[in-house]
Amino acid sequence: MAIQVSRDAEGYLVEPDDWSEDIANELAKEENIELDEMAWLVLNFIRTYYSEQNVVPDVRHVMSYLADKNEVGKREAKKLIFKLFPYGYVKQAVKIAGMKKPRAWSTG
């Protein structure tokens, strides 16, 4: 299935409301990412945070969320994020979650 929504030159969705789980699966395939239960936790957190705050969460918010969910420290949560999305939070997690590419961002 080819993605039938508008994307920018780097493959980010132009309109986050166009996102669906099918689109997430296609974006993940393009990034060679296997979406397991933990990856979906991250993607759904990003989507929920965005819908409530109207801004993409910084990786620190995701680390805190994963640390709480998995009862681990933030250092372990950060390792988990980069295990799930090895080329970076913004490059992969934010893109697969259907967000626009942030203009300026710490990739931390």
Image: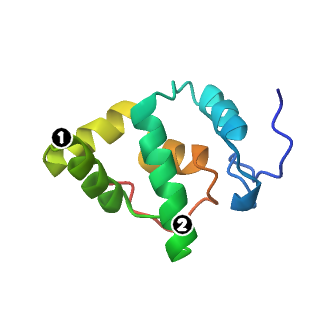
Return the x and y of residue 74 as percentages of the image width and height: 18, 50
Query: Which residue is label 2 attached to?
Result: 50
Residue 108 relative to residue 55: left or right: left
Pointers 2 and 1 in contact (C-beta within 8 Å): no
State the image quarter where residue 25 is shown.
top right
The image shows residue 62, relative to residue 93, as above or below, that is below
The image shows residue 36, relative to residue 10, as above or below, that is above
> If the image is split into quadrants, where does the C terminus sit?
bottom left
Return the x and y of residue 80 as percentages of the image width and height: 29, 36
Please indicate, yes or no, whether residue 56 appears anywhere in the rendered image. Answer: no
Disc 1 secondary structure class: helix
Decide which of 55, 48 is in the foreground and name it.
48
Disc 2 secondary structure class: helix
Please indicate, yes or no, whether residue 21 appears anywhere in the rendered image. Answer: yes
Residue type highlighted by circle 2: Tyr
Residue type highlighted by circle 1: Glu
- Earlier residue among tags 2 and 1: 2
Decide which of 5, 102 is in the foreground and name it.
5
Q: Residue at x 52, y 27 (%)?
A: 33
Return the x and y of residue 22 as percentages of the image width and height: 71, 35
Return the x and y of residue 35 as percentages of the image width and height: 51, 29
Q: Residue at x 54, y 66 (%)?
A: 50
Q: Residue furthest left?
A: 73
Q: Residue at x 28, y 52 (%)?
A: 63
The image shows residue 27, relative to residue 57, as above or below, that is above
Q: CA distance from mark 2 to mark 1?
A: 24 Å
Residue 60 relative to residue 107: left or right: left
Residue 99 relative to residue 94: left or right: right
State the image quarter where residue 39 is shown.
top left
Q: Residue furthest bottom?
A: 53
Per the rendering, the mark at residue 76 is 1
Q: How is the image coloured?
A: rainbow
